[in-house]
Image (tube, rainbow, N blue to C red):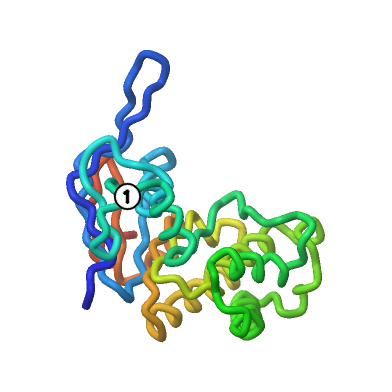
Amino acid sequence: METIIQVENVVKSFNQGSKKVEVLEGINLTVQENQLIALRGRSGSGKTTLLNLLGALDKPTSGDIYFKDKHLNKLSEKQRSEIRRTEMGFVFQSYGLVPLMSVEENVEFGLRIAGVPRSEWQENIEESLELVGLTKRKKHRPFELSGGEQQRVAIARAVAVKPKLILADEPTAELDSKMAFRIIHAFQELVKRTSTTIIMTTHDPGILEILDHVYTLEDKKIAYQKKENII
């Protein structure tokens, strides 16, 4: 099994006025392909910061991050942008939908940006909307959807591209428990059937219970936890 993400001694700090605030300290992490991984930790523990680093949206203060043997720290912004566009999918808490586009147009927009061949668009759109249970809402625009439905559109858009890596920040936070578990089972199937790897953050103990790989962020450090020690 190939390593898709390698994090070595990563530190991330921010300047807050004249004060330096360290969010992550000495993070080491190895992620293999075809895994569904959860990051857990209290609010403010650095989960979103770590996702942004893994997704080449930010650079560490020190340490090294590799994506498929590419040293992200040393790539130009153009190279990092190309990797994000073609090999990664993102699900943010802010959804990031285009307001004037319908559900299916938002998913299509993601495919267009990623450079997916036009001949694959329709099938990818239909598959991803079926996955999140929004086939009947595909003509609706974001303002006509609930927060949970908008979240599901964001998930469909990320999945439709069939990227190597999906980074999802609290992807089930706005969903009822039934839909949340449907999404997680869909993630599990995606990982099983394709070469996709998914790293997500969550607070949900029910979801943590059914995942095989859980890491906890605490005191600026990261630790792997076996399932029986999670709850």
Residue at image point 63% right, 53% down: 96
The answer to whether residue 79 is left or right of residue 5 is right
Residue at image point 34% right, 17% down: 19
Instruction: Judge by depth and name the residue closer to the eye, 77 or 89.
Output: 77
Instruction: Judge by depth and name the residue closer to the eye, 152 or 173.
Output: 152
Q: Is residue 95 above or below residue 115?
A: above
Q: Position of residue 178 (x, y in %)?
A: 59, 72
- Placement of the C terminus among the 4 image quadrants: bottom left
Q: Is residue 130 above or below residue 11?
A: below
Q: Is residue 189 above or below residue 37?
A: below
Q: Position of residue 131 (x, y in %)?
A: 59, 79
Q: How many marks?
A: 1
Q: Secondary structure at mark 1?
A: loop
- Placement of the N terminus among the 4 image quadrants: bottom left
The answer to whether residue 224 is left or right of residue 41 is left
Q: Position of residue 132 (x, y in %)?
A: 61, 75
User: Three-letter amino acid code at disc 1?
Assistant: Leu
Q: Is residue 156 visible?
A: yes
The answer to whether residue 83 is left or right of residue 121 is left
Q: Which residue is mark 1?
A: 75
